[in-house]
Image (cartoon, coloured by chain):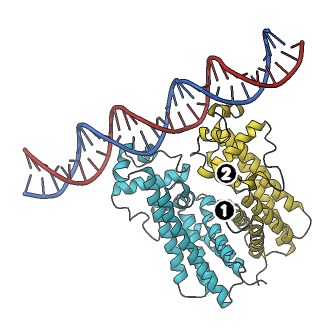
Chain colours: A cyan, B yellow, C red, D blue
Amino acid sequence: MSTAEETDGENTPWSEVTPEAARRLLVAAVEAFAERGYHATTTRDIAGRAGMSPAALYIHYKTKEELLHRISRIGHDRALLLLETAADRDGTAAERLAGAVQAFVRWHAERHTTARVVQYELEALSDEHRAEIVELRRKSDAAVRRIISEGVRTGEFDVPDVPGTTLAVLSLCIDVARWFNAQGSRTPDEVGTLYADLVLRMVGPRK
Amino acid sequence: MSTAEETDGENTPWSEVTPEAARRLLVAAVEAFAERGYHATTTRDIAGRAGMSPAALYIHYKTKEELLHRISRIGHDRALLLLETAADRDGTAAERLAGAVQAFVRWHAERHTTARVVQYELEALSDEHRAEIVELRRKSDAAVRRIISEGVRTGEFDVPDVPGTTLAVLSLCIDVARWFNAQGSRTPDEVGTLYADLVLRMVGPRK
DNA sequence: CGCGAACCTGAGCAAGCGCTTAGGGGACGC
DNA sequence: GCGTCCCCTAAGCGCTTGCTCAGGTTCGCG
């Protein structure tokens, strides 16, 4: 369907999902969950989008919730990788923070279908699965906080409330998945650049 | 249940919902929708929380979707009122923007149960109802954009992309409803003050 | 050709869904 | 006492849900 989804520039989207039929089902589930939400999506709808019968789904996944967990896990791994890569780069804190925001926002805009499921369907996970995902989110928070803390230490940034500002930065980026529209006038890169600028203003020294 | 919900300082929460039984049902629906989401909530659950039989719901509301629409409509009216009141006040653009963000964020934190339903269950509405709500959101956007535009005109603000920054400010505030936790360490007022400061930095002149 | 493994389907089950209907029971005027 | 109105419940209807299971098709390999 969506060519922007299929031909992702920086990586093959779901290459880690190995039986091809399982991948087709997972991609169909991402689309359906993003459109209607997890609870409003039926297993018949997922199977139908993948061109299979409802029973085929249960050959590759034990339950509908396992499908959601696989999607959420892969998405969170990817998001965490983006942030930690940006945090580990060389350069000033400002350069690294701008890079992290640019990459994180770009991902949320470009792959907003996936990101919507990843960010807004957490409470549909089982307790064990949700605990696993929450731990990944804690690490994402730590990566951003590390950049901001170092900027404060070197005097590049003026941030009275580091945990609060970290939360606000992540919140701002994540919410891109909710409002971004591929038919809109802004490209993912433009939104990333705008947001990187706004975040640098949030942490920069007062005039 | 939650005393913070029941005893709202600035207004009686659902006083506009007039038959008392209808109000009890609506409050129960807000709690249930916020906890599990609209589609995962059953009419039996709503009626049970209100201490009634499932059939009682249909004396006061035609469908489950009508309940969601009433909640969404009242919440959006309240949010719009907050923003327009702040925009119409006297003072500098910076003062008015800070006031708008403080009030808007405070509402999203203090009444995060309601706000979660209002902000994250739009696609469960019927087409007509959603169109009505989208119009209210357009007006909220216009109120914030007006403040920022005036700040740019008077030279108080330096904002290269007014529509984009307006979107980011609203997005930042709305997402408070998603992560705010009443058991957490921050009060709604503290979050409002933090966010007002961050937003002023976003629009302020470069150092 | 025979055989086993991998994959998928048609049919359907038990449970739960939104919503309806027939009727009960208390408060009120007369 | 009696009828009327309003608010509510018990029971359940028709349908959809997540999921199962027996069996069929396709394939590589000897």
Within 10 Å of disc 2 (Cα), the crowding (few <14, some 14-19, many 20+) is: many
Give B131 or A39, whichever is nearer the viewer. Answer: A39
Residue occupying the far right of the picture? B90
Which residue is tagged 1?
B181
Answer whether residue B189 is visible to the viewer in this image: yes
Location of residue A20 (image quadrant): bottom left
What x and y, as percent, mark residue C9? Answer: 32, 40
Label 2 lies in what chain? Answer: B
| SS for callout 2 | helix
Task: Name the residue at 44% across, 64% down.
Answer: A13
Q: Residue A178 in the image: x percent, y percent?
A: 61, 59
Looking at the rendered structure, the kind of residue marked 1 is: Asn
Chain letter, disc 1 residue: B
Q: Give how far across and how far down residue C3 sits, in percent.
A: 11, 48
Name which residue type carries label 2.
Answer: Val
Q: Is residue B121 visible?
A: no
On screen, residue B146 versus residue C2, left or right, reads: right
Q: Is residue A180 left or right of residue D19?
A: right
Mark 1 vs mark 2, CA separation in Å: 15 Å
Locate the C terminus of chain B and report the quarter of the image it occupies.
Answer: bottom right
Q: Which mark is residue B117?
A: 2
Residue found 79% across the figure and 65% down from its top: B102
For residue B16, what is the image quadrant?
A: top right
Which numbered disc, 1 or 2, marks the residue that appears first in the sequence?
2
Task: Kindly indicate the quadrant of the structure image that contains residue B99.
Answer: bottom right
